[in-house]
Amino acid sequence: MPEIDIARYLEIVKKEVSNRRVPVVDLIAVQTKEPFKVLVATILSARTRDEVTASASAKLFAKAATPDDLAGLSEEQIEKLIFPVGFYKNKAKHLAKLPEALAQFGGVVPQTMKELLTLPGVGRKTANLVQSVAFQLPAICVDTHVHRIMNIWGYVDTDTPQKTEMALRKKLPEEFWIPVNSLLVSFGQSICRPIGPHCDECPLSSDCAKIGVTPRKTRTAKTPKGAIKCISWNVNGIRAVEKKGFVDTLLAFDADIIGLQETKAQPDQLSDDLKDIPGYTSVWHSAERKGYSGVALYTRLKPLAVHYGIGEEEFDCEGRVIGLEFENFHLLNIYFPNAGAGLKRLDYKLAFDAALQRYCQKLEEKKDVILCGDFNVAHKEIDLKNPKTNVKNAGFTPEERCWMDGFIDDAGYIDTFRMFNQQPEQYSWWSYRFNARAKNIGWRIDYFCVNAGAKEKVIDAGIMQEINGSDHCPVQLLYQL
Ligand code: SF4
């Protein structure tokens, strides 16, 4: 393979990322010029999104701007300040020991690789970053992006970041040692992403060897310009579905907003892989009770605000609603309560239905509202396989259906699926028992609804019965902005 002109590649990357976000550690270096803060931010940044690192660093530095201040904090206090960075418990342990370790260097951050490697929580990558960013010394910090992209380009052929560092030390001109990390982190976060790199919009696309790369799929023909694709899915346990390839499934949706219900996880039970899906920001609203209920949203559109709950404690403590507010609309992702065995929670559910409707109608006074989620009710007989035998069962009681009648007929909300499809046997949930899914003995209880005024913006709606992984399948909406 011909040798690539690395100076030209990096110049193109530099232009490409000039208007993109600066990696958080570089930002902190520029803003503070303090090696101690650069070191701490670098430790916090491992396996953590930049926004989370930035906010955790700000909280920690407000209490501990120097090693002496940090020595005054207990490990538990540090844990609380840096939560939810990845591996926050381990990082808090390391940070609690840092002041004592720095004492042997007169209480300041040392500059040599050998000395830096004696500090708790500091490996080669961190040490290189501190050397280059904090002290402007010739060091090459090879993180996952540098390692990955240099191999994609065919500039090196290595299987570990450490080998990449050694290979780059031999062949990368020294003038690029310091900037290469910042450039490729920024490029790797925006264009050359770890999963589904954006080759279609990359200025290097015609030159790049694309070794080992599967470029992202571009928008499908079904998502017209100016429209968004939204998906709603009751995953019945995010940690369970993660083991069945959830991240790849989500990326394959190529959707702009994805709402999940019944996540059944607290924030500290989520893996970084789930929280940091490339190209998406995720927001989570968990129930106070562990392993119960919970909703989440992934979005690649930047919202004006995120709203947790509907402002009524008896419902919000169950993690049932999370909303994104955009310029012209709200999107609410909802997990409606189940009326329960023996209809023990029917009153609670009806109270929730009424409260949710009040909330929507208030929002609707200012902006359009899209609601998605598991409504836990089949509206009409056509929406379940066995209506006659289920009239007294949760999800098909006259009371629950009566609320849905009012929501649609009186309040004017649109069940978008029925705008396009009047067929029977269109279900989104099947019991795990009796081989119900294979026999299509199911219920349609997952919906996308919009307020009456937004009806003309609905382009398409459907059910994705081919997607497995939960007892529900996803439903989707194409919506003109
Ligand atoms: S063409 Fe694709 S693989 Fe190559 S650098 Fe650009 S985004 Fe990465």
Image (spheres, rainbow, N blue to C red):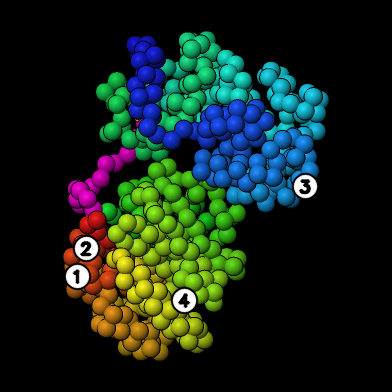
Residue matched to label 4: 337
* Location of the C terminus (image quadrant): bottom left
Which region of the structure is painted magenta?
A: 213-227
The residue that mark 3 highlights is: 74
Please say if the residues under marks 4 and 1 sit with CB atoms less than 8 Å apart.
no
Q: Which of the pair 200/366 is nearer the observer?
A: 366
User: What residue sits right under mark 2 in the picture?
Assistant: 458
Residue type pointed to by label 1:
Met
Mark sitting earlier along the chain (2/1): 1
Mark sitting earlier along the chain (4/3) = 3
Q: 97 or 453, which lies in front?
A: 453
Where does residue 325 sit, x and y in percent of width and height?
Answer: 38, 59
Disc 2 crowd, CA 10 A, few/some/many (<14, 14-19, 20+): many
What number is the disc on residue 419?
1
Image coordinates of residue 131 in percent, x first then y, are 62, 21
Instruction: Find residue 100 and report its horizontal and vertical position in percent.
Output: 80, 33
Q: Secondary structure at mark 2?
A: strand
Secondary structure at badge 4 equals loop
Q: Report the Cα–Cα distance between label 4 and label 1.
A: 26 Å
Q: Secondary structure at mark 1?
A: helix
Ligand 1 located in image quadrant: top left
The type of residue carrying mark 2 is: Val
Q: Quick one: quadrant of the N terminus?
A: top left
